[in-house]
């Protein structure tokens, strides 16, 4: 719980800092997809090797989350964000060098840098945002993740036609450079402002020194950690399965051209931007329990709708797009409410993201194998019904556990 004397930094500064980081936390992964065929042709990659380009960052999320949490705890959030931005900047430039070795080295480094960002941003939100605003800021963060993905997905191929794929990939490092510049200036001002000041012994946001507070309880001893791990694993499996296979599903079931299918599939990301703003408003209005139930229902509507009424796919993609953003908001808002402070939030987030991304990394291969084994989409879609039902169940149980049946966000 926050000390009532805690002075939050200006919310506008916090939000802008989160936005400039979020723009680079998903877009670089998606950027290579529109030009993967050109990359594979130029570098002579097999289909399996090309598939690894998209899978390696998600595997890094799973493997490196505990190390990322340790880095945040030891170095502090500001240093972790600077490392994130620097890592994303350098890795994108390395990946753009046209060779197989640099492509994979840059991709692995990119995954590690983004993993650090995945862990530190929720910690900053928990530390620097009043609890009654956590849902709204998490929603904005989620919306900007989707904006970054959509922007790079739509613009990389046209850039590659003009500049070639290496420069098209390198161009997105400018977003990381902007984030690095913003946070460099912010950290410098914080240090300048604290020097010679009576409160100079305090942390970056007016917090008391770490030595003055008791150590946080272990994240693994908090039941909410495991409930939210199961919810996030279900959410991530569903999200990455749909992100990977929606274009192929549309080509197979609607007869659309590849370009048309890709454009329709991108609405799944576009509606996530809407969800990033809509779901926090719902959270503030009706509380966590009802928000979790409604978001889970939207996820289920996508999976069951594709089975029972596939002709209405545009409608199902709308509901599913809102749900994929909403599920992220539900999980990380619940984490903020279940944690006693930013340090405990960091530990819980590391466990949740490690387990969630382990499951997420299996989504593409599992769905692809089921499609190939059964010769159709019926079984894969029923698996996704199960995954979205699992999210609904565990997120609701977590919501009840965190604050009971009628909780709404509040300051404390």
Image (spheres, rainbow, N blue to C red):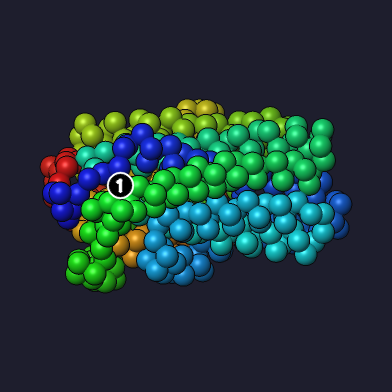
Residue sitting nearer the eye, 191 or 287: 191
Q: Is residue 133 left or right of residue 400?
A: right
Mark 1 burial class by Cα count in 10 Å: few <14, some 14-19, many 20+:
many
Residue sitting nearer the eye, 340 or 377: 340
Image point (23%, 53%), residue name:
198
Residue 233: in sight, yes or no?
no
Q: Is residue 145 left or right of residue 406?
A: right
Q: Which residue is mark 1?
A: 128
| Extreme residue toward the front, this view | 196
352, above or below 204, in the image: below
Residue sitting nearer the eye, 339 or 238: 339
306, above or below 343, in the image: above
Give the total of numbered labels. Answer: 1
Residue sitting nearer the eye, 193 or 255: 193
Image point (41%, 46%), residue name:
189
Image point (75%, 32%), residue name:
158
Image point (59%, 57%), residue name:
87
Residue 135: x %, y % from top left: 30, 40
Q: Is residue 380 left or right of residue 2?
A: right
Residue 263: x %, y % from top left: 64, 31
Assign the N terminus to one quadrant of the image: bottom left
Q: Quadrant of residue 133?
A: top left
Residue 160: x %, y % from top left: 78, 38
Residue 384: x %, y % from top left: 47, 50
Q: Secondary structure at mark 1?
A: helix
Residue 130: in sight, yes or no?
yes
């Amino acid at each position: 719980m926050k000390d009532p004397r805690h002075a939050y930094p200006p919310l506008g500064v916090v939000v802008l800092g989160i936005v400039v980081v979020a723009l680079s936390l998903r877009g670089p992964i998606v950027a290579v997809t529109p030009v993967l065929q050109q990359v594979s042709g130029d570098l002579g990659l097999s289909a399996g090797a090309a598939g690894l380009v998209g899978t390696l960052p998600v595997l890094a999320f799973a493997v490196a989350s505990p190390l990322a949490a340790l880095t945040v705890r030891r170095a502090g959030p500001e240093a972790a964000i600077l490392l994130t931005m620097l890592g994303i900047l350098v890795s994108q430039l390395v990946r753009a060098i046209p060779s197989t070795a640099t492509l994979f080295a840059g991709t692995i480094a990119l995954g590690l840098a983004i993993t650090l960002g995945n862990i530190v941003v929720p910690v900053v939100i928990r530390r620097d945002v009043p609890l009654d605003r956590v849902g709204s800021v998490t929603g904005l963060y989620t919306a900007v993740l989707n904006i970054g993905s959509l922007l790079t997905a739509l613009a990389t191929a046209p850039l590659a036609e003009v500049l070639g794929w290496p420069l098209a990939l390198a161009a997105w490092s400018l977003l990381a450079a902007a984030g690095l510049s913003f946070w460099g200036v912010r950290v410098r001002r914080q240090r300048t402002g604290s020097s010679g000041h009576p409160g100079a012994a305090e942390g970056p946001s007016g917090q008391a020194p770490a030595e003055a507070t008791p150590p946080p309880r272990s994240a693994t001893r908090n039941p909410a950690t495991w409930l939210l791990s199961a919810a996030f694993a279900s959410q991530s499996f569903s999200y990455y399965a749909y992100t990977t296979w929606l274009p192929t599903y549309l080509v197979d079931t609607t007869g659309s051209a590849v370009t048309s299918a890709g454009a329709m599939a991108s609405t799944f990301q576009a509606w996530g931007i809407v969800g990033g703003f809509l779901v926090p408003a719902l959270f503030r209005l009706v509380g966590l329990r009802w928000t979790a139930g409604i978001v889970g229902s939207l996820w289920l509507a996508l999976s069951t709708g594709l089975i029972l009424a596939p002709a209405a796919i545009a409608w199902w993609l709308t509901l599913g797009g809102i749900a994929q953003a909403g599920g992220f908001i539900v999980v990380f808002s619940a984490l903020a409410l279940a944690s006693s402070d930013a340090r405990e939030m960091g530990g819980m987030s590391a466990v949740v993201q490690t387990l969630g991304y382990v499951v997420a990394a299996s989504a593409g291969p599992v769905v692809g194998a089921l499609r190939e084994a059964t010769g159709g989409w019926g079984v894969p879609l029923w698996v996704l019904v199960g995954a979205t039902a699992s999210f609904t169940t565990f997120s609701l149980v977590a919501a009840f556990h965190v604050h009971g049946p009628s909780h709404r966000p509040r300051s404390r």
